[in-house]
Image (cartoon, rainbow, N blue to C red):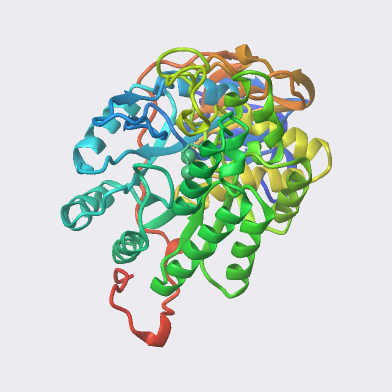
Amino acid sequence: MAEFDLVVRGGEVATGFGTTRCDIGVKDGRIVALGEKLADGARVVDAAGTLVLPGGVDSHCHIEEPSRGGYASTGQAEPPLTVNEESFATASSAAFAGGTTSVVCFIPQWKGYGVWERYADYRARAARGMIDHSFHQIISDPTDTVMDQEVPRLVAEGVRSLKVFLTYEPLHLNDAQYLRVLTKARTLGCLVTVHCENYEAINWRTHELLKHGMTAPKYHAWARPPVVEREATHRAIALAELVDQPIQIFHVSCEEAAEEIARAQARGVKVWGETCPQYVSLTAADMDRPGFEGAKFMCSPAPRSRAEHERVWEMIRRGTLDVISSDHCAFSFEGDRGKRQNGSDAVFRDIPNGIPGFTARLPIIFSEGVSKGRISLDEFVRLTSTNPARLMGLAPRKGAIAIGADADLALWDPKKKVTITNALMQHAIDYTPYEGMEVTGWPVMTIRRGEVVMRDGKVQAEPSTGRFLPRGPYAMIKPRGITPDGFDPAPPPAA
Ligand code: URP
Ligand code: ZN
Ligand code: ZN
């Protein structure tokens, strides 16, 4: 019997800390050997001419997420229950098509409801897909029952991050509620991830814009300029510093917000910054396309400008922003769950926020980053795979090409030129905001736990083969033990 189930032969293996030409031996879904001229396995993949990357880890994506009231104000008394169009099956295809092999996605909480029931439902949904998955728990209503009884049960199950929104009706938390989540996370040993925009400021700007008849999609950006993101980022960090609770700031769109993170990092605060491909490729001008087209580019924070893209790249190079996720949160353009769900003349406030981005994430960042010389190949690997795996407590099983790691690999043709079309995205959505974008560098094969799940764009994976990735305690998100005056009303768990 062959020593290996699979040998990936002759590729340029990119570890995130240098590249080396070697073979990869896989047994039982794990990497068991790295070496020159390994013996043949039961199957051999010829990787000559490709870069062999650790499979992408997308630590921020919304898949098959049931919502009550959605992300827009519908004006209805009893908001309807809807589910993202992207199912775990379609999301898995999209992810594999783009070289991503693991995701961390969101269990919802609706105001007035608990979370435990949602967890069971979401586990069952995710189990139907093909991609390995872990969960963040959204907290929109931190009641005693939720925080003291249900969240500890979830953490015991391996859900080790909580997501809070400082804006959006009906999800946003006020400062007292945010502090409650921070303190509970500290006592349980969780990471808190934060959507930073100022709720009241956006409401005020929105009200004034609508009053002046400024209703088109482009005014989405006017309602939430960088200053509202900077203010909320500053506040999110200050309160986390008060509690001494590690946080990650999600989807940073601009230098102003990133500078807040950089200043806190320089003080030693445990705060990490994430950005997304849309903040280095889409602009506010895209939301000013004719008719309703601008809705295709609406997400929050809003896309900024070409000049801002360069500033975001600089914050990436400085290491302030060390994770690039997709924030895939997809609504088709057409259909009753899509961007037009409140009509083709809906005011910007009532158009759902979010764009698809699973498949395009790695190609856009490789092309705009590595091919255009803005970042190195090592940085690309760390930003899109190694760093998110480490911060989410999934390393070294995920995000690494190393002995013992899961054999999750993306074979990458760094010279392949592709014009992005919606068909290439393989998602359930009827458009991509990146239609027509030309990229250099594309995944030609994706391997999940030693199994080829995408070859030359053809996804081949059985349903219900994705695994849940429970997360235990890990050192990276341990509080520093520094509180003002040493007063510590919410001590972390004993090591
Ligand atoms: O517009 C966005 N980003 N929608 C998704 C929800 C979120 O804020 O992460
Ligand atoms: Zn968000
Ligand atoms: Zn999101």
Q: Along the line of sight, which residue is nearer the eye, 25 or 165?
A: 165
Tell me which corner region of the image, top left, top right, bottom left or bottom right, holds residue 281. top right
Tell me which corner region of the image, top left, top right, bottom left or bottom right, holds residue 493. bottom left
Q: Along the line of sight, which residue is nearer the eye, 387 or 267?
A: 267
Tell me which corner region of the image, top left, top right, bottom left or bottom right, holds residue 68. top left
Residue at coordinates 42% horizontally, 20% vertically from top-left? 85
One can see residue 388 in this view: yes
Q: Residue furthest bottom?
A: 485
Q: Residue furthest right?
A: 373
Q: Where does the image place residue 51, in percent across and percent down from the top left?
A: 72, 32
Residue at coordinates 34% horizontally, 24% vertically from top-left? 83
Q: Where does the image place residue 400, in percent across and percent down from the top left?
A: 57, 44
Q: Along the line of sight, which residue is nearer the eye, 315 or 81?
A: 81
Decide: is 471 above or below 481. above
What is the tally of numbered marks visible in this picture?
0
Q: Where does the image place residue 350, in percent across and percent down from the top left?
A: 45, 30
One can see residue 396 in this view: no
Residue at coordinates 30% horizontally, 71% vertically from top-left? 494
Residue at coordinates 59% horizontally, 28% vertically from top-left? 216
Please identify the quadrant where the C terminus is shown. Answer: bottom left
Decide: is 283 above or below 189. above
Q: Along the line of sight, which residue is nearer the eye, 61 or 29?
A: 61
